Amino acid sequence: MEKQKTERIDKILAMSGFGSRKDVKKLIKSGQISVNGQIVNNARAQVNPTVDEIIAVGKVLEYHKNVYIMMNKPQGVISSTRDSVESTVIDLLEGEYSHRKPFPVGRLDKDAEGLIFLTDDGKMAHRLLSPKNRVDKTYYVEVQGKLEKSDVQAFAAGIILEDFTTLPAKLEIMEAGNTSRAYVTICEGKFHQIKRMMNARGKEVTFLKRLSLGPLKLDEKLAPGQWRELTKEEINLLW
C-alpha cells in the first residue's frame, strides 16, 4: 500500500495563509493548532493535510495543494507577476494569495481584457503552454475594416508575418462592415499575435477579449478586475 504523504505542520499552515513560518510557529507554541483533536506544540510535526483534521485558531483548515484562479483581466493591467511601474494581475489579488505565489499562465496584451488563468501548479501550466499540446484560445475581436471570406481562408491557411508563419487559426465573422466583429481561435500565443494577423489583412484591432483557454471558459459573472477560484469540475477539465 502506498504510504500517505505527510508534510510539516508549519509548512502546511504557511501555505494555507496563516503567515510566514515564523508566524505559524508562534501560533503552534501558543497552543492554537490541533491535529485530530490533539494540541500540536512541535512545528516539525508531520501531518497529512488531506486526511488529518487540522484546526487552526478555532477553524477547520481546508487545505489545497495548489491554487487555481480565473480572472477577468481589465484593460490597462499587465499579465505579469511584478512590475515597478505598471499594475499587474497579481496586484489585483490584493495579496490574498501571496503565500502561494501564483503566476499567470500565458500572456494577454495590456490593452486587452478577458480570461487570465493563474496558478502555482507548474505541471498544469506547462501542459497548457506547451506548443506540442496546441491548446486553443478563443477571443472576441472588433476591428476597423470589413472582414470577408478571404480573411477566413487566410486565417485557416496560416498567415505569413515578418518573423514567423502562424499555425492554422479559425476566424468566425459575426458582423462585417466598416467595423467588423468576430471570434478568433488560435493555438499559439505570440506577442500581439491576433493584432498582427489582422494587420496583415489590412484591419486594425480596436477591442480584444479572451473568452476561453482550452476547456476553461470565462465566467460571465466576473466583471473586469474580478476573479474567483476554479471549481473542482473546472480543474478536472484542465487535466
Image (cartoon, rainbow, N blue to C red):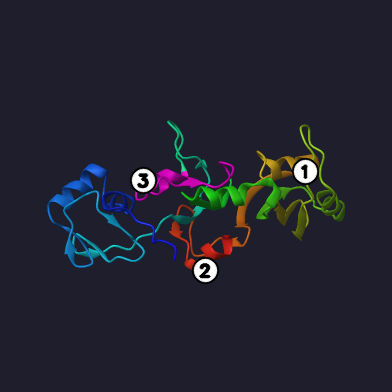
Region rendered in magenta: 89-111
Q: Is residue 36 visible?
A: yes
Q: Amino acid at mark 2?
A: Glu
Work out whether residue 167 or residue 181 is closer to the camera in this orientation and state it.
167
Q: Amino acid at mark 3?
A: Ser
As helix, strand or loop, the secondary structure at mark 3 comes to: loop
| Residues at marks 2 and 3, CA–CA distance in whole angstroms | 25 Å
Question: Residue 170 appears at what percent x and percent y?
Answer: 77, 55
Question: Residue 88 appears at what percent x and percent y?
Answer: 46, 41
User: Where does the C terminus fall, quadrant-wise?
Assistant: bottom right
Q: Are marks 2 and 1 in contact (CB under 8 Å)?
A: no
Say few, some or many: other residues with alpha carbon within 10 Å of mark 2 (under 14 / 14 to 19 / 20 or more).
few
Examine the structure image and report whether residue 31 is included in the region drawn in magenta. Answer: no
Work out whether residue 51 or residue 149 is closer to the camera in this orientation and state it.
51
| Residues at marks 2 and 1, CA–CA distance in whole angstroms | 32 Å
Q: Residue at x 59, y 42 (%)?
A: 109
Decide: is 23 above or below 63. Answer: above
Question: Residue 154 appears at what percent x and percent y?
Answer: 84, 49
Residue beneath disc 3: 98
Residue beneath disc 2: 233
Residue beneath disc 1: 166
Q: Are marks 2 and 3 in contact (CB under 8 Å)?
A: no
As helix, strand or loop, the secondary structure at mark 1 comes to: loop
Work out whether residue 99 or residue 51 is closer to the camera in this orientation and state it.
51
Say few, some or many: other residues with alpha carbon within 10 Å of mark 1 (under 14 / 14 to 19 / 20 or more).
many
Q: Is residue 175 visible?
A: no
Q: Are marks 1 and 3 in contact (CB under 8 Å)?
A: no
As helix, strand or loop, the secondary structure at mark 2 comes to: helix
Q: Amino acid at mark 1?
A: Thr
| Residues at marks 1 and 3, CA–CA distance in whole angstroms | 37 Å
Q: What type of secondary structure mainly makes up the magenta span?
A: loop
Say few, some or many: other residues with alpha carbon within 10 Å of mark 3 (under 14 / 14 to 19 / 20 or more).
some
